[in-house]
Image (cartoon, rainbow, N blue to C red):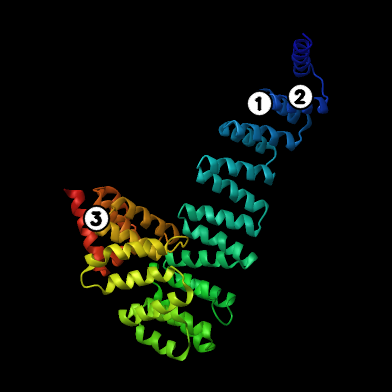
Amino acid sequence: MIKLFQIIFSIIFMSSILFANINDEDIYILLALEAIDNGDFETAIELYDKLYIDTKKDEYLKEKINILIQLGKNEDAIDSINKYQKSNPSNIEIKKLLAYLYINQRDIDNTIKTYEDIVKLEDNKQNNRFLGNLYLAKKDYKNARKYLLKSYQASNDESTLLIINSIDMELKDFELSIPLIKDYFKDELSDTFAHILIELGSNYGVLDSLESLYLDYYNNKQSFQNAKNLAKLYLFKNKTQEALDLSNKYDFGLDFMIDLYLAKKDYKNAKIQAQKAFEETKNNHYLGVLAIIEFEDAKDKNLVLKSVISNLKKAIEGNENHVFYNYLGYLMIDYDININEGIDYVKLALKISPNNFFYLDSLAWGYYKVNDCKQAKIEIEKIPLNVINAQDEIKEHFEKINKCLVE
């Protein structure tokens, strides 16, 4: 009976406060908190709305909006913010909350518009980088570069520099990146940065420009790092003799020698180096390397297929390697072993290296093999036509996929 009386009293008391013109801020706050505790979110929204109207304090608007977001009422939250912004156009925190809501709605255009306003009010490296990445997601590369460059100039951040480099490659204007790279790396490129640039350059067809850049670094300072970067680039360009000349001058280690012999298709020496590396390290990575060597060197591929797949699976246990993922996946697809499993492996490779033309071809070929010609065409058309025409196997797949669609 007492509990019932308390509930009735609470209802009467709340009603009197809501409808009487009582302006006691603390009481409204307590009632709003009590409503939330009781799961009565609609009442809490009304109370915070009244608190905001009476006090004009932004904190109450934020509380109201947060409850609307929790209830999944994003449109109502957006409407509340837009009404607020008519008289308060310069509140950055509220604008960021609005941007968050637009992102949840997958409304990239309004997110960009909101962040452009934010950058005008607060022009810093974080906001410019975020806006640049939004434009990048929209594939508006020129605006992406504009804002990412502003962020980079304020932060000198290496990862941002790499994104700018990739954009310049996409826009076929990589020469714009060279002064930025030379300014950041005065004497020599770091191993990781140099390797990523080579992979990007291979995908975008700018290895000649990178060769000039790496040669400049090497000629200015003939260090081990500059020599190794240049030798790696030579391997990507199939200039194996030039790479061998540098490796004779510098000890690049077993991994480099394995790559060099593989590039020269000298499987005998590649196998010797890989076995030596495995014996020294007991690292299953080299089982994957040995598996690839075994398959490439085999006269009858079917005889070694089972052991190659087994060793590749061992190699990827606890080791995310996009080369092994793709190689394993493609074998399973091409030899009709388990096509769907093969597709899954290729997708893992593409998660790590999303623009790799050979991996995109593997995925397209997998979809073709399961008779999903439409998806196969979508994937293979991500590869530039000049690359397709330059690679016999990719060209053959491209023609078969197009023929499949016609049939």
Q: Residue at x 46, y 91 (%)?
A: 249
Judged left or right of residue 212, residue 126 is: right
Q: Nearer the viewer, mark 3 or mark 1?
A: 3
Mark identifier at residue 31 = 2
What element does badge 3 sit on? loop
Give the distance between the C-alpha atoms of the residues marked 1 and 2, in whole angstroms. Answer: 11 Å
Q: Which residue is mark 1?
A: 41
Residue type at mark 2?
A: Leu
Quadrant into which the N terminus falls: top right
Judged left or right of residue 179, residue 247 is: left
* Residue 197, x across and y down, in percent: 47, 71
Instruction: Compare marks 3 and 2 and give the one earlier in the sequence.
Output: 2
Number of other residues with Cα within 10 Å of mark 1, as a class: few under 14, some 14 to 19, many 20 or more: many
Q: In the current view of this chain or complex, which residue is farthest to the bottom?
A: 249
The vertical placement of 340 against 245, above or below, is above
What element does badge 2 sit on? helix
Q: Residue at x 50, y 89 (%)?
A: 219
Q: Residue at x 75, y 28 (%)?
A: 51
Q: Which residue is mark 3?
A: 336
* Residue 226, x across and y down, in percent: 51, 83
The vertical placement of 112 against 253, above or below, is above
Instruction: Compare marks 1 and 2 and give the one earlier in the sequence.
Output: 2
* Residue 322, x across and y down, in percent: 41, 63
**Is residue 238 shown to the viewer in this render?**
no
Q: Quadrant of residue 359?
A: bottom left
Residue type at mark 1?
A: Phe
Give the distance between the C-alpha atoms of the residues marked 3 and 2, in whole angstroms. Answer: 67 Å
Q: Nearer the viewer, mark 3 or mark 2?
A: 3
* Residue 355, x across and y down, in percent: 40, 61
Give the distance between the C-alpha atoms of the residues marked 3 and 1, in whole angstroms. Answer: 57 Å
Instruction: Compare marks 3 and 1 and give the one earlier in the sequence.
Output: 1
Number of other residues with Cα within 10 Å of mark 3, as a class: few under 14, some 14 to 19, many 20 or more: some
